């Protein structure tokens, strides 16, 4: 079958209706003629929001640490001691290491859909607890609890790195993969820029209250940290409802039907045209016994393919 546009699959004989079999579901993702599709844009928004939140949460601690000095270390010249400040800031990095290893393994073992969204849920819970950290009457102080929840926060951030980048890469087409990964990672820079802007705005709002009582900085640092949960809350629903990656379903789970279902969950022009052609073929088969629409090789798997010109409709 040298002519890719005028052949169809027949698993019986030329006088019977052919049995059309769907093509490999990944062909649509590997179509280099496609630009960004709706499913890619949605995946990009969901994934990049996580990277934005990650960068914001990591960078914001450098801005609120001086405020913590004025509140909790008045007897140390309003500065957090270096022996505490170093481990305090490093807790999130240690959490990131643990999170990357854990979620990277879980994502490969149980699938993207089963795991994607859990890391963002960890980030939301940890961020809220960071913003509401308090001290016990005796024993652990607010800084101790804040440091612990910063570790948990880092665990979620570390899990977001492999999951978001992998999901974005697997949902992208061959010619858009680099662009999608670049745009997702660029959100880290955006998060680092937004963090000081938010801090300045909140400080400006509390300027008068801080002049009256320096302890009002306690509201400022909690608000600045807590706002980091907003982008995560807005996108966590989308992550939990994102279908399984077609590439993971087809190549790891060997589930071609699940991969095609994932692609069909995002309507595209190609899918609409394919459905229209299939409906037309069904009507032609019912009327004449053979389809009149040429079947495109990119949408059909062939065996025993024969030229359409050599086939005549059955005699009545």
Image (tube, grey):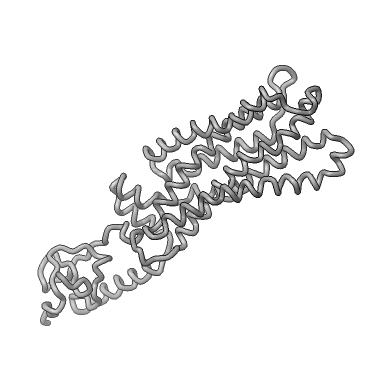
Q: Residue furthest right?
A: 212
248 versus 88 height, above or below: below
Above or below residue 77? Residue 179 is below
Q: Is residue 73 above or below residue 37?
A: above
Image coords of residue 224 (percent x, y): 70, 42
**What residue do we see at 75% from left, 34% from top?**
67
- State the image quarter where residue 31 is shown: bottom left
- Is 29 located above or below residue 94 in the figure? below
Q: Quadrant of the C terminus?
A: bottom left
| Residue 228 can be seen, yes or no | yes
Residue 26 occupies which quadrant of the picture? bottom left
232 or 44, which is in the foreground? 44
In percent of the image, x 71 and y 27: which residue is there? 142
User: Quadrant of the image for the N terminus?
Assistant: bottom left
Percent x, y for residue 69? Answer: 75, 29
Residue in the image at 76% along x and 46% along y: 202
Q: Is residue 141 left or right of residue 250?
A: right
Give the mark count: 0
Dividing the picture into quadrants, the one containing residue 123 is top right
Instruction: Please provide percent x and percent y for residue 152.
Output: 57, 32
Question: Left or right: 1 with respect to 97?
Answer: left
Front-most of residues 3 and 114: 3
Q: Name the residue nearer the viewer: 234 or 62.
A: 62
| Residue lying farthest to the top in this orientation | 138
> Where residue 196 appears, x then y in whole percent?
69, 46
Residue 238 in sight in this render: no
């Amino acid at each position: 079958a040298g002519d890719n546009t005028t052949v169809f699959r027949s698993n019986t004989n030329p006088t019977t209706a052919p049995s059309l079999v769907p093509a490999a579901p990944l062909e649509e993702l590997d179509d280099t003629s496609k630009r960004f599709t709706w499913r890619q844009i949605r995946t990009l928004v969901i994934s990049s929001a996580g990277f934005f939140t990650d960068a914001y949460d990591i960078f914001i601690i450098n801005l609120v640490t001086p405020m913590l000095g004025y509140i909790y270390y008045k007897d140390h010249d309003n500065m957090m001691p270096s022996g505490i400040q170093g481990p305090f800031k490093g807790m999130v990095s240690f959490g990131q290491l643990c999170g990357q290893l854990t979620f990277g393994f879980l994502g490969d073992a149980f699938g993207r859909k089963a795991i994607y969204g859990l890391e963002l849920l960890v980030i939301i819970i940890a961020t809220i607890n960071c913003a509401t950290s308090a001290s016990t009457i005796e024993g652990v102080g607010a800084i101790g609890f804040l440091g612990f929840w910063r570790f948990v926060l880092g665990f979620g951030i570390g899990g977001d790195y492999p999951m978001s980048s992998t999901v974005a890469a697997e949902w992208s087409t061959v010619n858009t993969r680099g662009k999608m990964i670049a745009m997702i990672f660029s959100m880290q820079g955006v998060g680092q820029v937004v963090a000081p802007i938010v801090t300045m705005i909140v400080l400006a709002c509390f300027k008068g209250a801080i002049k009256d009582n320096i302890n009002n900085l306690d509201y400022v640092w909690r608000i600045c940290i807590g706002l980091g949960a907003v982008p995560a809350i807005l996108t966590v629903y989308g992550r939990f409802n994102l279908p399984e990656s077609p590439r993971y379903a087809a190549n790891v789970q060997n589930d071609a039907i699940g991969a095609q279902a994932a692609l069909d969950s995002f309507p595209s022009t190609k899918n609409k045209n394919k459905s229209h052609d299939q409906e037309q073929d069904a009507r032609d088969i019912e009327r004449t016994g053979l389809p009149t629409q040429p079947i495109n090789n990119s949408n059909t798997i062939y065996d025993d393919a024969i030229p359409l010109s050599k086939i005549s409709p059955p005699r009545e």
